[in-house]
Amino acid sequence: MRLRYGAGEEAFRSELVSWLESNAPSPEQLRMPKASSADLQPWARDWQRRLFDAGWLVPGWPPELGGRDASPVEQMIYFEEMSRREIPRSLNPQGLGIIAPSIRDYGTDAQQQQFLLPTLRAEISWCLGMSEPTAGSDLASLRTRAVRDGDEFVVNGQKVWTSGAHQADWCLCFVRTNTEVPKHKGITALIVDMTTPGVEARPFPELTEPDFMDFNEVFFTDARVPMANLLGEVDHGWPITQGSLAHERAMLWIDYAYNVERSLRGLVALGAEPRAGGGRIGDDAVYRDEVASVAIDAQALLCMGFRGFSKFMAGKSAPEHSLLKLFGSESVQRSLAIGTSAIGAAGLDRNRLGPRLWRDGAWLTQWMRSFGGTIPGGTSEIQRNIIAERVLGLPRA
Ligand SMILES: Cc1cc2nc3c(=O)[nH]c(=O)nc-3n(C[C@H](O)[C@H](O)[C@H](O)COP(=O)(O)OP(=O)(O)OC[C@H]3O[C@@H](n4cnc5c(N)ncnc54)[C@H](O)[C@@H]3O)c2cc1C
């Protein structure tokens, strides 16, 4: 489905498309293996810098911050075109998508100078230190402790699942500074230099791809962080955990929608392949039925996304965010499960590629990766709780 917008907005699209035609990274660059989500390879630094200089990095922001003051509809067009072409804005998505907006919203002038522009221009990379062994969905239970000592904090504790920590220059780390108040109220955000003595990142491999070492445990042992690296106010870090890129959040569903469409195209192509015992995979009526349901899911996702977006534009609250996260991530997963099951044992062959979603991979690998999409940013169960309580008005669990 491709909607047409007003003449000014279509002119915005044409300008973007023609810029991408002469500037986008090559398919070979986009397919280069990366070691983690903080692995800013030279071509990726160069690409992000070019986006910044041309005002295409964060289009909704002003030109001095890599944007062009684009309207929300123009920003949606931007994300549509980037998703359709599978072009990432940054190879350090947590730095650009979560940490840069937090520094913009909460950072001092000195922090904006030291961190915001270098992050936007891909000169430094980041990891996000939120989850702990006993604090994931219930993030407010985090225990990593920071105690004030003169003009420094002394940090002790452990984070886990910290994507890219072993390759990141900096960490936006959430710590407990007060145990005497309700748990949401004693949390503070600190900017931690990953080379600080007492900070140790230990990467561990993923089940799906042993070569892609993104996850880390990060240990803090008497690590000293200067007061100058406090983001926001002491004990008031909770609003920062909630993220601050509301405009772009309202458009994250576009990635899910394009991934379901890519998966759908893969399923249609798979239907033409021979099946064990003769004929083609697509001769199977159950398979055709399942593929049709993926096609319906893809359209439903787009319709729900546009509906949420128009509510957001009208300034209304949109419960679609939880619905889209849940339905989007699970639709991707469902579609990949259909391909994996249809291809059978042949799907174990890593050289036989399925549809390219996040990166290349066999159907089985893509399906296993898709579980990751249902966890961060609130697991599927948490989204169901939110929908039950805030959308359907059911009693709290
Ligand atoms: C790909 C990926 C990248 C990540 N990157 C980062 C990162 O860079 N930095 C970072 O800090 N973290 C990161 N995480 C961690 C992520 O934020 C957590 O995994 C997530 O918050 C869930 O926490 P948990 O793993 O501790 O699971 P838990 O919260 O322990 O949940 C375990 C199970 O219980 C269910 N559950 C929990 N509470 C409830 C409830 N109230 N009602 C019903 N069911 C419930 C959950 O849905 C889940 O199935 C990443 C995770 C993934 C998958």
Image (spheres, rainbow, N blue to C red):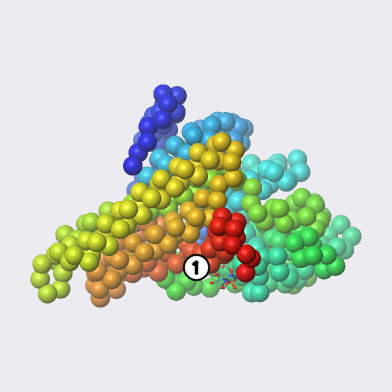
| Relative side of 25 to 37, left or right | left
Residue 269 percent across, percent down from the top left: 21, 57
Q: Position of residue 297 (x, y in %)?
A: 36, 54
**Ligand 1: which quarter?**
bottom right
The number of numbered badges drawn on the structure is 1
Quadrant hosting residue 341: bottom left
Q: From this viewpoint, is residue 341 visible?
A: yes
Between 87 and 383, the one lying in front of the other is 383
Q: Dot 1, crowdedness within 10 Å: few (<14), some or many (≥20)?
A: some
- In this picture, residue 121 sits left or right of residue 86: right
Residue furthest toward the left?
278
**Could you say which is closer to the camera, residue 195 or residue 153?**
153
Nearest the viewer among 234 and 221 is 234
* Vertical placement of residue 175 versus 114, above or below: below
> Could you tell me which secondary element the residue under label 1 belongs to?
loop
Dividing the image into 4 quarters, which one contains the N terminus?
top left
Residue positioned 37% across, 45% down in the render: 84
Answer yes or no: disc 1 within 8 Å of ligand 1.
no
| Residue for badge 1 | 213
Q: Position of residue 356 (x, y in %)?
A: 34, 56
| Residue 377 visible in the picture | no
Residue 130: name its quadrant: bottom right
Residue at the image point whose x is 56% and y is 55% from the top: 391
Question: Residue 231: x, y in percent?
Answer: 75, 51
Q: Is residue 286 above or below residue 393?
A: below
Picture quadrant of residue 220: bottom right
Which part of the image, by quadrant, shows the C terminus?
bottom right
Residue furthest top in the image: 7
What residue appears at the point 44 percent right and 58 percent down from the top-left corner? 327
Q: Residue at x 30, y 66 (%)?
A: 338
Amino acid at circle 1: Met
